[in-house]
Image: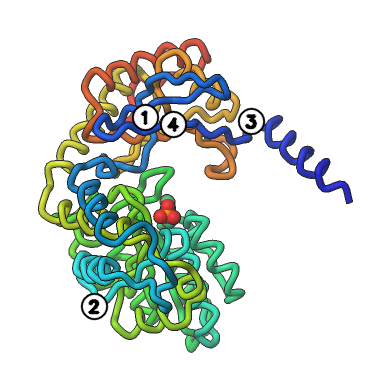
Amino acid sequence: MDFESLFRADLEQLKDDGNYRVFADLERRAGSFPKAHHHFEGSGQTRDVTVWCSNDYLGMGQSAVVTSAMHEAIDKCGAGAGGTRNISGTNHYHVLLEQELADLHGKEAALLFTSGYVSNWATLGTLLSRIPDVMVFSDEMNHASMIEGIRHSRARKVIWKHNDLDDLRAKLAAAPADAPKIVAFESVYSMDGDIAPIEAICDVADEFGAMTYLDEVHAVGMYGPRGGGIAEREGVMDRLTIIEGTLGKAFGVMGGYITGSVALIDWIRSFASGFIFTTALPPALAAGALASIRHLKKSAIERRRHKENVAKVRAGLTKAGIPWLDNPSHIVPVMVRDPKKCKWISDILMDQSGIYVQPINYPTVARGAERLRITPTPLHTDADIAKLISSLSDLWSQCALARHVAVA
Ligand SMILES: *Cc1c(COP(=O)(O)O)cnc(C)c1O
């Protein structure tokens, strides 16, 4: 087998399709968020860019509240955790952080993982492989981490139409009445920015005695009076069996978690391979996340300014006739619907305007749904916004892309 030529052929195919991923080599500059240095490929030179596609939605990754907590923890505890959670790696910051997370979601207990991806993969994988005869009902737009956890478990799975209550009910009703059931879904969907009807989904799940598993990754820190997510905003956190989240997006650090009952958390802690057999998060990460969560529980100004900037970007796009996908969240998808044009626009924005928006192509989104996923933050200035809109508008004409006079 000529492995090298297999690898090269697959990569050529990706490039031909316009789906080959090129990473922007960035050097984020603490205190200047959302600005960064962009290192050109191999040239040793850098230029300043404004980042418009970060999931550090509120800029907490550079907040002094977070970085000073991390510095302090490094000075106190050193760099790494020094082991798995079971074998010397549990640091007091992990314990405090789990208490904080349980409180954030109104649950009895919480469990940390090394990322949100791992928390979904390990939790769903463990539930679905250990509960006899269990079936999972998974929203068709669920994130890859949930899909992989489900696949890994080999449990029976039923995919229901995105956010479609009738389809969910019909599929639950068609399943054997005595099979244990888990309904898995997200609150804010990351690419379209739409939001699930959480309470209504819980009502349907209750009709069939199903457990509910909610991924709030794009909502934690962002919604609800204390940043507990959409379920907090809607007063329905107690309706979910498990609420899962990340420390790597609005909280600005890294790591993932689940929250739930004491017995459930203890059970996952005891049986999930993806939790047990891996080194615990560095204490400084836990300390930074702890500081970030505590801050966002009390402070709403970041969320308010963030909303204002999202509204400004949308208004600017509409005025310029650039089509964006309307949704009730903070994500602004500008639809290009062509992988090559999407990449081209992104490249020119970077090269000519110092604006960085990564093109989102297949398989992250469906073919024909290629887009620029714009994520305004509270720290983008009015001048940043004006420059984004005018640069996009120029490129829109050059690319001969359709303009919409108004997008609802
Ligand atoms: C990013 C993401 C994850 C994974 O979280 P990480 O902490 O980045 O691993 C899980 N679910 C959804 C919906 C996501 O977008």
Closer to the chain start, of discs 4 and 1, is 4
Q: Residue at x 59, y 67 (%)?
A: 151
Q: Residue 160 at x, y = what percent?
A: 49, 63
Q: Quadrant of ligand 1?
A: bottom left
The disc at residue 275 is none
The Cα atoms of the two marked residues, 1 and 2, are separated by 38 Å
| Three-letter amino acid code at the position of disc 2 | Glu
Residue type at numbered disc 3: Gly
Number of the front mark, 3 or 4: 4
Mark 1, other Cα within 10 Å: few <14 / some 14–19 / many ≥20: many
**C-alpha separation, residue under disc 3 versus residue under disc 4:** 22 Å
According to the image, what is the colour scheme of the structure?
A: rainbow
Sequence-first tag of 3 and 1:
3
Q: Nearer the viewer, mark 2 or mark 3?
A: 2
> What residue is disc 4 on?
26
Instruction: Kindly report the distance in space between the C-alpha atoms of the residues bearing marks 2 and 3.
Output: 47 Å
Q: Is residue 126 above or below residue 313?
A: below
- Residue identified by numbered label 2: 108
- Mark 3 neighbour density, 10 Å: few (under 14) some (14–19) many (20 or more): some
Mark 4 lies on a secondary structure that is strand
Residue 262 shown left or right of residue 26 in the figure: left
Residue under circle 3?
Answer: 18
Helix, strand or loop at label 3? It is loop
Q: From the image, state whether disc 2 or disc 4 is nearer to you.
A: 4
Judging depth in this view, the residue of 118 and 131 nearest the camera is 118
What secondary structure is marked by label 1?
A: strand
- N-terminal label among 2 and 3: 3
- Residue with the mark numbered 1: 51
> Residue 101 location, x and y as percent?
25, 66
Q: Are marks 4 and 1 in contact (CB under 8 Å)?
A: yes
